[in-house]
Image (cartoon, rainbow, N blue to C red):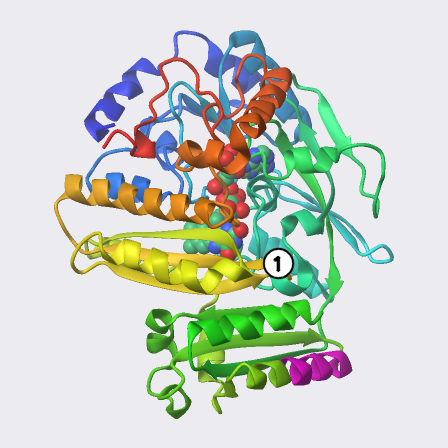
Amino acid sequence: MELMRAAQDLAQVQDESGLPGRLAAICGTANVLSGFAQRLPYARDRLPFATFAVRDGALPGTLPRLVVRPADEGEVASILRLARAEDVPVIPFGAGSGVLGGAIPLGGEVTLDLKRLDRLLHLNEVNGLATVQAGMNGGRFEVALNDRGWTCGHLPQSLHMSTVGGWAACRGAGQASTRFGKIEDIVVGLRAVLPDGEVLEVRPVARRSSGPSLRDLLVGSEGTLGVITEVTLRIWRRPEVELPAVLAFPSVAAGLDAARRILQGELRPAVLRIYDEEESAPRAGGLPAFGERPVLGIFQFCGPRRLADVEREMALEIVREAGGIEAGSDAPYEHWLAHRYESYSAKWQNAGHWMDTIEVTLPWDQLSEGHAAMRAAALSLCDGMHFGAHWSHAYPEGACQYMTLRLPPMERDRALRLHREAWDRIQRMTLERGGSIAHHHGAGLFRGPYMEGELGTTGLRLLQAVKDALDPGNLLNPGKLGLRPRAGADLSARGTDR
Ligand SMILES: Cc1cc2nc3c(=O)[nH]c(=O)nc-3n(C[C@H](O)[C@H](O)[C@H](O)COP(=O)(O)OP(=O)(O)OC[C@H]3O[C@@H](n4cnc5c(N)ncnc54)[C@H](O)[C@@H]3O)c2cc1C
Protein backbone atom coordinates (compact mmCIF):
# COMPACT_ATOMS: atom_id res chain seq x y z
CA MET A 1 0.00 0.00 0.00
CA GLU A 2 1.42 3.40 -0.93
CA LEU A 3 2.06 5.71 2.01
CA MET A 4 -0.18 8.36 0.49
CA ARG A 5 -3.05 5.92 0.45
CA ALA A 6 -2.20 5.04 4.02
CA ALA A 7 -2.31 8.70 4.95
CA GLN A 8 -5.80 8.95 3.51
CA ASP A 9 -6.75 5.99 5.63
CA LEU A 10 -6.08 8.28 8.57
CA ALA A 11 -9.19 10.25 7.79
CA GLN A 12 -11.29 7.12 7.52
CA VAL A 13 -10.25 5.99 10.96
CA GLN A 14 -11.78 8.95 12.68
CA ASP A 15 -13.78 5.90 13.50
CA GLU A 16 -17.48 6.57 13.17
CA SER A 17 -18.19 3.14 14.62
CA GLY A 18 -17.49 4.16 18.19
CA LEU A 19 -14.97 1.33 18.50
CA PRO A 20 -12.16 3.59 19.79
CA GLY A 21 -14.41 4.80 22.58
CA ARG A 22 -15.44 1.31 23.59
CA LEU A 23 -11.79 0.17 23.58
CA ALA A 24 -10.85 3.26 25.60
CA ALA A 25 -13.47 2.27 28.16
CA ILE A 26 -11.50 -0.94 28.67
CA CYS A 27 -7.92 0.30 28.75
CA GLY A 28 -8.00 4.09 28.81
CA THR A 29 -7.89 6.67 26.01
CA ALA A 30 -4.10 6.92 26.13
CA ASN A 31 -3.87 3.23 25.24
CA VAL A 32 -5.96 3.37 22.09
CA LEU A 33 -3.81 4.65 19.22
CA SER A 34 -5.55 5.91 16.13
CA GLY A 35 -3.16 8.47 14.60
CA PHE A 36 -1.34 7.65 11.39
CA ALA A 37 2.13 8.00 12.91
CA GLN A 38 1.08 5.95 15.94
CA ARG A 39 -0.21 3.07 13.82
CA LEU A 40 2.61 3.10 11.27
CA PRO A 41 5.12 1.08 13.40
CA TYR A 42 2.52 -1.69 13.64
CA ALA A 43 2.03 -1.95 9.88
CA ARG A 44 4.82 -4.47 9.62
CA ASP A 45 7.27 -6.67 11.43
CA ARG A 46 10.78 -7.61 10.28
CA LEU A 47 9.67 -9.60 7.24
CA PRO A 48 12.32 -8.69 4.64
CA PHE A 49 9.66 -8.34 1.94
CA ALA A 50 8.14 -5.62 4.15
CA THR A 51 11.53 -3.95 4.52
CA PHE A 52 11.81 -3.89 0.72
CA ALA A 53 8.39 -2.20 0.50
CA VAL A 54 9.22 0.43 3.12
CA ARG A 55 12.51 1.17 1.38
CA ASP A 56 10.39 2.09 -1.64
CA GLY A 57 8.05 4.33 0.35
CA ALA A 58 5.22 1.78 0.52
CA LEU A 59 3.67 -0.51 3.10
CA PRO A 60 3.67 -4.30 2.76
CA GLY A 61 -0.02 -4.68 3.66
CA THR A 62 -2.30 -2.23 5.39
CA LEU A 63 -2.21 -0.10 8.52
CA PRO A 64 -4.00 -1.59 11.52
CA ARG A 65 -7.41 -0.03 12.04
CA LEU A 66 -6.39 0.85 15.59
CA VAL A 67 -3.71 -0.16 18.09
CA VAL A 68 -4.73 -1.01 21.63
CA ARG A 69 -2.42 -1.54 24.60
CA PRO A 70 -3.99 -3.58 27.40
CA ALA A 71 -2.45 -3.56 30.87
CA ASP A 72 -3.33 -7.08 31.94
CA GLU A 73 -5.04 -10.34 31.08
CA GLY A 74 -8.46 -9.03 32.14
CA GLU A 75 -8.22 -6.20 29.62
CA VAL A 76 -7.08 -8.63 26.91
CA ALA A 77 -10.16 -10.76 27.59
CA SER A 78 -12.49 -7.73 27.50
CA ILE A 79 -10.97 -6.60 24.20
CA LEU A 80 -11.43 -10.02 22.61
CA ARG A 81 -15.05 -10.18 23.82
CA LEU A 82 -15.70 -6.75 22.32
CA ALA A 83 -13.94 -7.74 19.08
CA ARG A 84 -16.13 -10.81 18.86
CA ALA A 85 -19.31 -8.85 19.45
CA GLU A 86 -18.35 -6.33 16.75
CA ASP A 87 -16.73 -8.78 14.28
CA VAL A 88 -13.36 -7.00 14.45
CA PRO A 89 -10.22 -9.05 13.73
CA VAL A 90 -7.32 -8.73 16.19
CA ILE A 91 -3.56 -9.29 15.82
CA PRO A 92 -1.50 -9.99 18.94
CA PHE A 93 1.76 -8.03 18.78
CA GLY A 94 4.87 -8.59 20.89
CA ALA A 95 7.90 -6.61 19.74
CA GLY A 96 7.42 -7.02 15.99
CA SER A 97 10.69 -8.90 15.45
CA GLY A 98 9.04 -11.76 13.59
CA VAL A 99 10.52 -12.27 10.12
CA LEU A 100 7.61 -14.01 8.37
CA GLY A 101 4.99 -11.26 8.45
CA GLY A 102 2.94 -12.83 11.23
CA ALA A 103 2.02 -9.42 12.69
CA ILE A 104 1.25 -7.66 9.40
CA PRO A 105 -2.37 -6.45 9.11
CA LEU A 106 -4.24 -7.71 6.05
CA GLY A 107 -7.23 -5.40 6.39
CA GLY A 108 -9.31 -4.05 9.25
CA GLU A 109 -7.45 -5.59 12.18
CA VAL A 110 -6.96 -4.00 15.57
CA THR A 111 -3.41 -4.64 16.72
CA LEU A 112 -3.11 -5.72 20.35
CA ASP A 113 0.26 -4.52 21.65
CA LEU A 114 1.14 -6.68 24.65
CA LYS A 115 4.22 -4.84 25.88
CA ARG A 116 2.48 -3.44 28.95
CA LEU A 117 2.24 -7.00 30.28
CA ASP A 118 5.90 -6.76 31.22
CA ARG A 119 6.48 -8.13 34.69
CA LEU A 120 8.43 -11.06 36.03
CA LEU A 121 5.74 -12.43 38.33
CA HIS A 122 7.37 -15.23 40.24
CA LEU A 123 10.59 -17.16 40.60
CA ASN A 124 10.30 -20.60 42.16
CA GLU A 125 13.90 -21.42 42.96
CA VAL A 126 13.05 -24.88 44.30
CA ASN A 127 11.18 -26.05 41.21
CA GLY A 128 13.39 -24.02 38.86
CA LEU A 129 10.53 -22.10 37.25
CA ALA A 130 9.99 -18.46 36.30
CA THR A 131 6.53 -17.06 35.60
CA VAL A 132 6.51 -13.97 33.41
CA GLN A 133 3.94 -11.85 31.64
CA ALA A 134 3.97 -12.45 27.90
CA GLY A 135 4.88 -8.93 26.81
CA MET A 136 8.11 -8.74 28.81
CA ASN A 137 11.14 -7.96 26.68
CA GLY A 138 13.34 -11.04 26.33
CA GLY A 139 16.57 -9.26 27.22
CA ARG A 140 15.04 -7.70 30.34
CA PHE A 141 13.73 -11.10 31.37
CA GLU A 142 17.13 -12.76 30.98
CA VAL A 143 18.92 -9.96 32.84
CA ALA A 144 16.40 -10.20 35.69
CA LEU A 145 17.12 -13.92 35.93
CA ASN A 146 20.90 -13.41 35.68
CA ASP A 147 20.77 -10.92 38.55
CA ARG A 148 19.41 -13.71 40.72
CA GLY A 149 21.89 -16.32 39.50
CA TRP A 150 19.64 -17.96 36.90
CA THR A 151 19.30 -18.19 33.12
CA CYS A 152 16.43 -19.26 30.92
CA GLY A 153 18.84 -20.68 28.33
CA HIS A 154 16.66 -19.30 25.51
CA LEU A 155 18.95 -16.76 23.85
CA PRO A 156 17.76 -15.91 20.34
CA GLN A 157 19.80 -13.45 18.31
CA SER A 158 16.76 -11.18 18.71
CA LEU A 159 16.85 -11.50 22.53
CA HIS A 160 16.63 -7.75 23.14
CA MET A 161 14.08 -7.03 20.41
CA SER A 162 11.51 -9.74 21.15
CA THR A 163 9.06 -10.67 23.91
CA VAL A 164 8.75 -13.88 25.90
CA GLY A 165 5.21 -14.37 24.57
CA GLY A 166 6.52 -13.90 21.02
CA TRP A 167 9.11 -16.65 21.62
CA ALA A 168 6.34 -19.07 22.59
CA ALA A 169 3.95 -17.90 19.86
CA CYS A 170 6.57 -18.45 17.15
CA ARG A 171 8.01 -21.71 18.54
CA GLY A 172 11.48 -20.19 18.51
CA ALA A 173 14.98 -21.48 19.24
CA GLY A 174 17.88 -19.75 20.98
CA GLN A 175 21.60 -19.88 20.33
CA ALA A 176 22.19 -22.32 23.21
CA SER A 177 19.33 -24.58 22.15
CA THR A 178 21.44 -27.68 21.69
CA ARG A 179 21.90 -27.81 25.48
CA PHE A 180 18.88 -25.99 26.91
CA GLY A 181 16.26 -26.99 24.33
CA LYS A 182 13.97 -24.97 22.10
CA ILE A 183 11.13 -22.92 23.49
CA GLU A 184 8.74 -25.90 23.43
CA ASP A 185 11.12 -27.70 25.82
CA ILE A 186 11.37 -24.63 28.05
CA VAL A 187 7.73 -23.53 28.33
CA VAL A 188 6.26 -25.60 31.14
CA GLY A 189 2.94 -23.79 31.58
CA LEU A 190 1.03 -20.82 30.21
CA ARG A 191 -2.14 -18.77 30.30
CA ALA A 192 -3.89 -17.59 27.16
CA VAL A 193 -7.08 -15.75 26.31
CA LEU A 194 -9.02 -17.67 23.67
CA PRO A 195 -10.93 -15.93 20.86
CA ASP A 196 -14.18 -16.03 22.88
CA GLY A 197 -12.54 -14.21 25.79
CA GLU A 198 -12.25 -17.31 28.01
CA VAL A 199 -8.93 -17.88 29.77
CA LEU A 200 -7.09 -21.17 29.22
CA GLU A 201 -4.65 -22.08 31.99
CA VAL A 202 -2.10 -24.81 31.36
CA ARG A 203 -0.74 -25.35 34.87
CA PRO A 204 3.04 -25.74 35.06
CA VAL A 205 3.77 -29.34 35.96
CA ALA A 206 6.86 -31.38 35.17
CA ARG A 207 4.90 -33.68 32.87
CA ARG A 208 1.38 -34.96 32.33
CA SER A 209 -0.23 -37.92 30.61
CA SER A 210 -3.75 -36.62 30.22
CA GLY A 211 -4.47 -36.36 26.54
CA PRO A 212 -2.91 -34.26 23.77
CA SER A 213 -0.87 -31.33 25.02
CA LEU A 214 -2.92 -28.14 25.23
CA ARG A 215 0.32 -26.26 25.87
CA ASP A 216 1.53 -27.32 22.42
CA LEU A 217 -1.69 -26.11 20.86
CA LEU A 218 -0.68 -22.59 21.86
CA VAL A 219 3.11 -22.85 21.47
CA GLY A 220 3.67 -22.08 17.80
CA SER A 221 0.12 -20.87 17.14
CA GLU A 222 1.40 -17.41 16.10
CA GLY A 223 -1.53 -15.52 17.49
CA THR A 224 -4.15 -17.49 15.55
CA LEU A 225 -5.66 -19.56 18.39
CA GLY A 226 -5.23 -17.42 21.50
CA VAL A 227 -3.40 -14.50 23.07
CA ILE A 228 -0.69 -15.81 25.38
CA THR A 229 -0.69 -13.63 28.49
CA GLU A 230 1.60 -15.48 30.88
CA VAL A 231 4.35 -18.05 30.47
CA THR A 232 6.07 -20.28 33.03
CA LEU A 233 9.52 -21.33 31.87
CA ARG A 234 12.12 -23.80 33.04
CA ILE A 235 15.22 -21.99 34.31
CA TRP A 236 18.77 -23.09 35.13
CA ARG A 237 21.49 -21.98 37.52
CA ARG A 238 23.97 -19.83 35.59
CA PRO A 239 26.73 -22.13 34.39
CA GLU A 240 29.94 -22.25 36.40
CA VAL A 241 31.99 -22.19 33.19
CA GLU A 242 31.58 -21.57 29.49
CA LEU A 243 34.38 -23.25 27.55
CA PRO A 244 34.89 -22.35 23.89
CA ALA A 245 36.34 -24.45 21.10
CA VAL A 246 37.22 -22.97 17.73
CA LEU A 247 37.71 -25.61 15.07
CA ALA A 248 38.82 -25.92 11.47
CA PHE A 249 37.39 -28.66 9.25
CA PRO A 250 38.51 -29.71 5.77
CA SER A 251 34.96 -29.58 4.39
CA VAL A 252 31.31 -28.96 5.24
CA ALA A 253 30.76 -32.73 5.14
CA ALA A 254 33.48 -33.25 7.76
CA GLY A 255 32.08 -30.55 10.04
CA LEU A 256 28.56 -31.95 9.80
CA ASP A 257 29.84 -35.47 10.38
CA ALA A 258 31.48 -34.31 13.62
CA ALA A 259 28.32 -32.47 14.69
CA ARG A 260 26.15 -35.52 14.06
CA ARG A 261 28.44 -37.83 16.00
CA ILE A 262 28.64 -35.39 18.90
CA LEU A 263 24.84 -35.22 19.15
CA GLN A 264 24.40 -38.95 18.66
CA GLY A 265 27.18 -39.50 21.17
CA GLU A 266 24.96 -37.94 23.87
CA LEU A 267 27.05 -34.78 24.21
CA ARG A 268 25.23 -31.47 24.49
CA PRO A 269 27.39 -28.45 23.70
CA ALA A 270 25.49 -25.25 24.51
CA VAL A 271 26.64 -23.73 21.24
CA LEU A 272 27.41 -25.74 18.12
CA ARG A 273 27.92 -23.75 14.97
CA ILE A 274 29.41 -24.95 11.68
CA TYR A 275 29.78 -22.39 8.89
CA ASP A 276 30.09 -23.16 5.19
CA GLU A 277 33.11 -21.80 3.33
CA GLU A 278 31.29 -18.64 2.29
CA GLU A 279 30.45 -17.77 5.92
CA SER A 280 33.73 -19.09 7.36
CA ALA A 281 35.96 -16.85 5.26
CA PRO A 282 35.00 -13.47 6.82
CA ARG A 283 35.08 -14.97 10.33
CA ALA A 284 38.26 -17.04 10.21
CA GLY A 285 40.04 -16.35 6.92
CA GLY A 286 43.62 -15.31 7.59
CA LEU A 287 44.04 -17.60 10.57
CA PRO A 288 46.68 -20.23 9.62
CA ALA A 289 44.54 -23.24 10.59
CA PHE A 290 41.99 -22.36 7.93
CA GLY A 291 44.44 -22.53 5.00
CA GLU A 292 43.82 -26.23 4.39
CA ARG A 293 40.68 -26.51 6.46
CA PRO A 294 38.38 -23.70 5.33
CA VAL A 295 35.29 -24.65 7.36
CA LEU A 296 34.84 -22.99 10.76
CA GLY A 297 33.25 -24.58 13.81
CA ILE A 298 32.43 -22.66 16.98
CA PHE A 299 31.42 -24.70 20.01
CA GLN A 300 30.77 -23.81 23.63
CA PHE A 301 30.46 -26.26 26.50
CA CYS A 302 28.93 -25.05 29.73
CA GLY A 303 27.77 -26.14 33.15
CA PRO A 304 29.71 -27.45 36.13
CA ARG A 305 33.43 -27.31 35.29
CA ARG A 306 34.06 -31.04 35.58
CA LEU A 307 31.19 -31.87 33.25
CA ALA A 308 32.05 -29.16 30.72
CA ASP A 309 35.71 -30.28 30.68
CA VAL A 310 34.75 -33.87 29.95
CA GLU A 311 32.18 -32.92 27.31
CA ARG A 312 34.70 -30.69 25.57
CA GLU A 313 37.38 -33.35 25.63
CA MET A 314 35.05 -36.04 24.27
CA ALA A 315 33.72 -33.73 21.56
CA LEU A 316 37.25 -32.81 20.46
CA GLU A 317 38.09 -36.50 20.07
CA ILE A 318 35.18 -36.79 17.65
CA VAL A 319 36.25 -33.62 15.85
CA ARG A 320 39.74 -35.06 15.29
CA GLU A 321 38.31 -38.36 14.02
CA ALA A 322 36.29 -36.35 11.48
CA GLY A 323 39.43 -34.56 10.25
CA GLY A 324 39.00 -31.32 12.21
CA ILE A 325 41.59 -29.57 14.37
CA GLU A 326 41.59 -26.89 17.06
CA ALA A 327 42.25 -23.58 15.31
CA GLY A 328 44.65 -22.25 17.95
CA SER A 329 42.79 -18.94 18.27
CA ASP A 330 39.58 -18.04 20.06
CA ALA A 331 39.15 -14.85 18.02
CA PRO A 332 36.17 -16.12 15.95
CA TYR A 333 34.42 -17.22 19.17
CA GLU A 334 35.12 -13.92 20.93
CA HIS A 335 33.79 -12.00 17.93
CA TRP A 336 30.66 -14.14 17.81
CA LEU A 337 30.13 -13.71 21.57
CA ALA A 338 30.49 -9.93 21.38
CA HIS A 339 28.07 -9.56 18.45
CA ARG A 340 25.67 -12.43 19.07
CA TYR A 341 22.60 -10.21 19.52
CA GLU A 342 23.22 -7.87 16.61
CA SER A 343 21.43 -7.86 13.26
CA TYR A 344 23.52 -7.68 10.10
CA SER A 345 20.82 -7.06 7.56
CA ALA A 346 20.42 -3.25 7.76
CA LYS A 347 23.85 -2.64 6.25
CA TRP A 348 22.92 -4.60 3.12
CA GLN A 349 19.32 -3.43 2.87
CA ASN A 350 20.46 0.19 3.14
CA ALA A 351 22.94 -0.39 0.34
CA GLY A 352 20.13 -1.51 -1.95
CA HIS A 353 20.65 -5.28 -1.74
CA TRP A 354 17.70 -7.64 -1.38
CA MET A 355 18.61 -9.74 1.61
CA ASP A 356 16.72 -12.50 3.38
CA THR A 357 17.38 -15.55 5.53
CA ILE A 358 15.72 -18.95 5.32
CA GLU A 359 16.05 -21.56 8.05
CA VAL A 360 14.97 -25.12 7.45
CA THR A 361 15.42 -28.47 9.16
CA LEU A 362 17.07 -31.34 7.29
CA PRO A 363 17.96 -34.88 8.30
CA TRP A 364 21.68 -35.63 8.64
CA ASP A 365 21.71 -37.87 5.56
CA GLN A 366 20.54 -34.93 3.41
CA LEU A 367 22.39 -31.99 4.89
CA SER A 368 25.65 -31.94 3.01
CA GLU A 369 24.13 -32.67 -0.41
CA GLY A 370 21.11 -30.51 0.36
CA HIS A 371 23.39 -27.58 1.11
CA ALA A 372 25.28 -28.01 -2.16
CA ALA A 373 22.06 -28.34 -4.16
CA MET A 374 20.38 -25.32 -2.55
CA ARG A 375 23.50 -23.26 -2.99
CA ALA A 376 23.61 -24.15 -6.69
CA ALA A 377 19.89 -23.43 -7.08
CA ALA A 378 20.24 -20.01 -5.43
CA LEU A 379 23.41 -18.97 -7.23
CA SER A 380 21.93 -19.85 -10.61
CA LEU A 381 19.19 -17.25 -10.11
CA CYS A 382 21.32 -14.30 -11.19
CA ASP A 383 24.85 -12.92 -11.42
CA GLY A 384 26.14 -11.48 -8.16
CA MET A 385 23.84 -13.61 -6.01
CA HIS A 386 25.16 -14.34 -2.50
CA PHE A 387 24.46 -17.61 -0.69
CA GLY A 388 25.96 -18.53 2.68
CA ALA A 389 24.86 -21.02 5.31
CA HIS A 390 25.55 -22.23 8.81
CA TRP A 391 24.18 -24.95 11.06
CA SER A 392 23.51 -23.85 14.62
CA HIS A 393 20.80 -26.04 16.15
CA ALA A 394 21.48 -29.76 16.13
CA TYR A 395 19.66 -32.93 17.16
CA PRO A 396 20.45 -36.62 17.03
CA GLU A 397 18.29 -36.80 13.87
CA GLY A 398 19.30 -33.70 11.94
CA ALA A 399 19.99 -29.98 12.13
CA CYS A 400 18.83 -26.53 11.18
CA GLN A 401 20.35 -25.14 8.01
CA TYR A 402 20.28 -21.33 8.22
CA MET A 403 20.82 -19.70 4.86
CA THR A 404 21.49 -16.07 3.96
CA LEU A 405 20.52 -15.01 0.45
CA ARG A 406 21.33 -11.66 -1.04
CA LEU A 407 20.41 -10.38 -4.45
CA PRO A 408 22.59 -7.51 -5.66
CA PRO A 409 21.00 -4.09 -6.24
CA MET A 410 18.67 -4.36 -9.24
CA GLU A 411 15.34 -3.20 -10.53
CA ARG A 412 12.56 -3.82 -8.00
CA ASP A 413 10.16 -6.03 -9.96
CA ARG A 414 12.92 -8.35 -11.06
CA ALA A 415 14.32 -8.54 -7.53
CA LEU A 416 10.97 -9.41 -6.00
CA ARG A 417 10.37 -12.09 -8.59
CA LEU A 418 13.80 -13.64 -8.01
CA HIS A 419 13.41 -13.35 -4.25
CA ARG A 420 10.18 -15.34 -4.33
CA GLU A 421 11.73 -17.80 -6.76
CA ALA A 422 14.62 -18.39 -4.32
CA TRP A 423 12.12 -19.12 -1.54
CA ASP A 424 10.11 -21.45 -3.79
CA ARG A 425 13.17 -23.43 -4.78
CA ILE A 426 14.55 -23.81 -1.27
CA GLN A 427 11.27 -24.68 0.39
CA ARG A 428 10.46 -27.24 -2.32
CA MET A 429 13.92 -28.81 -2.12
CA THR A 430 13.62 -29.00 1.67
CA LEU A 431 10.39 -30.96 1.44
CA GLU A 432 11.81 -33.22 -1.29
CA ARG A 433 14.67 -34.07 1.07
CA GLY A 434 12.38 -34.93 3.96
CA GLY A 435 12.92 -31.74 5.95
CA SER A 436 10.76 -29.05 7.50
CA ILE A 437 10.19 -25.70 5.78
CA ALA A 438 10.67 -23.80 9.07
CA HIS A 439 13.06 -24.52 11.93
CA HIS A 440 12.39 -21.59 14.29
CA HIS A 441 11.11 -18.46 12.55
CA GLY A 442 7.55 -19.74 12.18
CA ALA A 443 5.28 -19.55 9.15
CA GLY A 444 3.55 -16.17 9.55
CA LEU A 445 2.18 -14.84 6.29
CA PHE A 446 5.06 -15.42 3.93
CA ARG A 447 5.29 -19.18 4.41
CA GLY A 448 1.53 -19.67 4.04
CA PRO A 449 1.82 -21.06 0.49
CA TYR A 450 4.11 -23.86 1.72
CA MET A 451 2.06 -24.99 4.71
CA GLU A 452 0.12 -27.65 2.83
CA GLY A 453 3.40 -29.20 1.68
CA GLU A 454 4.66 -29.09 5.25
CA LEU A 455 1.61 -30.47 7.06
CA GLY A 456 0.00 -32.44 4.24
CA THR A 457 -3.55 -31.82 3.05
CA THR A 458 -5.00 -33.67 6.03
CA GLY A 459 -2.72 -31.93 8.49
CA LEU A 460 -3.61 -28.47 7.23
CA ARG A 461 -7.32 -29.41 7.22
CA LEU A 462 -6.98 -30.49 10.86
CA LEU A 463 -5.28 -27.22 11.80
CA GLN A 464 -8.02 -25.27 10.00
CA ALA A 465 -10.66 -27.33 11.83
CA VAL A 466 -9.08 -26.46 15.18
CA LYS A 467 -9.01 -22.81 14.15
CA ASP A 468 -12.66 -22.91 13.04
CA ALA A 469 -13.73 -24.56 16.28
CA LEU A 470 -11.91 -22.08 18.52
CA ASP A 471 -12.45 -19.02 16.38
CA PRO A 472 -15.57 -19.46 14.21
CA GLY A 473 -15.56 -15.78 13.25
CA ASN A 474 -11.93 -15.97 12.04
CA LEU A 475 -11.01 -13.02 14.24
CA LEU A 476 -7.62 -13.86 15.69
CA ASN A 477 -4.74 -13.11 13.32
CA PRO A 478 -6.65 -14.35 10.27
CA GLY A 479 -4.79 -15.50 7.17
CA LYS A 480 -1.58 -16.51 8.95
CA LEU A 481 0.00 -19.97 9.31
CA GLY A 482 -1.52 -20.96 5.96
CA LEU A 483 -5.02 -20.64 7.46
CA ARG A 484 -7.97 -19.10 5.66
CA PRO A 485 -7.89 -15.29 5.38
CA ARG A 486 -10.97 -13.11 5.81
CA ALA A 487 -12.80 -11.93 2.71
CA GLY A 488 -11.02 -9.06 1.00
CA ALA A 489 -7.69 -9.62 2.80
CA ASP A 490 -4.70 -7.87 1.23
CA LEU A 491 -2.20 -10.71 0.79
CA SER A 492 0.29 -8.71 -1.27
CA ALA A 493 2.97 -9.01 1.44
CA ARG A 494 3.24 -12.68 0.47
CA GLY A 495 4.71 -11.54 -2.82
CA THR A 496 3.04 -14.45 -4.59
CA ASP A 497 1.38 -12.35 -7.28
CA ARG A 498 4.70 -11.93 -9.11
C1 LIG B 1 17.73 -9.95 13.73
C2 LIG B 1 16.76 -11.04 14.10
C3 LIG B 1 17.25 -12.20 14.68
C4 LIG B 1 16.37 -13.23 15.05
N1 LIG B 1 16.88 -14.32 15.66
C5 LIG B 1 16.04 -15.30 16.08
C6 LIG B 1 16.56 -16.45 16.76
O1 LIG B 1 17.77 -16.57 17.02
N2 LIG B 1 15.68 -17.40 17.15
C7 LIG B 1 14.33 -17.28 16.92
O2 LIG B 1 13.59 -18.17 17.32
N3 LIG B 1 13.83 -16.21 16.26
C8 LIG B 1 14.64 -15.23 15.85
N4 LIG B 1 14.13 -14.13 15.20
C9 LIG B 1 12.69 -14.05 14.91
C10 LIG B 1 11.86 -13.35 16.03
O3 LIG B 1 12.67 -12.54 16.83
C11 LIG B 1 11.17 -14.39 16.88
O4 LIG B 1 10.21 -15.07 16.09
C12 LIG B 1 10.49 -13.83 18.13
O5 LIG B 1 10.10 -14.92 18.93
C13 LIG B 1 9.27 -12.96 17.84
O6 LIG B 1 8.90 -12.31 19.06
P1 LIG B 1 8.14 -10.91 19.06
O7 LIG B 1 7.78 -10.63 20.47
O8 LIG B 1 8.94 -9.88 18.37
O9 LIG B 1 6.84 -11.29 18.23
P2 LIG B 1 6.08 -10.46 17.09
O10 LIG B 1 6.98 -10.28 15.92
O11 LIG B 1 5.44 -9.27 17.68
O12 LIG B 1 4.95 -11.52 16.70
C14 LIG B 1 5.27 -12.69 16.03
C15 LIG B 1 4.01 -13.56 15.90
O13 LIG B 1 3.61 -14.03 17.18
C16 LIG B 1 2.32 -13.53 17.52
N5 LIG B 1 2.39 -13.14 18.93
C17 LIG B 1 3.29 -12.31 19.53
N6 LIG B 1 3.07 -12.25 20.85
C18 LIG B 1 2.01 -13.06 21.10
C19 LIG B 1 1.29 -13.42 22.27
N7 LIG B 1 1.64 -12.96 23.47
N8 LIG B 1 0.25 -14.27 22.15
C20 LIG B 1 -0.12 -14.77 20.95
N9 LIG B 1 0.52 -14.46 19.81
C21 LIG B 1 1.57 -13.62 19.88
C22 LIG B 1 2.05 -12.39 16.56
O14 LIG B 1 0.67 -12.26 16.29
C23 LIG B 1 2.82 -12.81 15.33
O15 LIG B 1 2.06 -13.72 14.58
C24 LIG B 1 14.98 -13.09 14.81
C25 LIG B 1 14.50 -11.92 14.24
C26 LIG B 1 15.37 -10.90 13.88
C27 LIG B 1 14.82 -9.64 13.28
Of all residues, the one furthest to the left in this rendering is 411
Front-most of residues 297 and 240 = 297
Q: Quadrant of residue 82?
A: top right
Q: Is residue 208 left or right of residue 303?
A: right
User: For the point 63% across and 53% down, which residue is it?
Assistant: 182
Front-most of residues 421 and 457 = 457
Q: Quadrant of residue 81?
A: top right
Report x, y in % for residue 259: 57, 71
Q: Is residue 229 left or right of residue 109?
A: right
Q: Is residue 139 above or below residue 461?
A: below
Where the N terminus falls, by quadrant? top left
Q: Is residue 173 above or below residue 151?
A: above
Q: Which residues are magenta?
A: 305-315
Report x, y in % for residue 51: 30, 44
Give the residue type that dot 1 points to.
Glu
Q: Is residue 269 above or below residue 145?
A: below
User: For the point 38% across and 75% down, which residue is it?
Assistant: 280
Where the C terminus falls, by quadrant? top left
Magenta: predominant secondary structure element? Answer: helix
Q: Quadrant of residue 346?
A: bottom left
Residue named by callout 1: 397
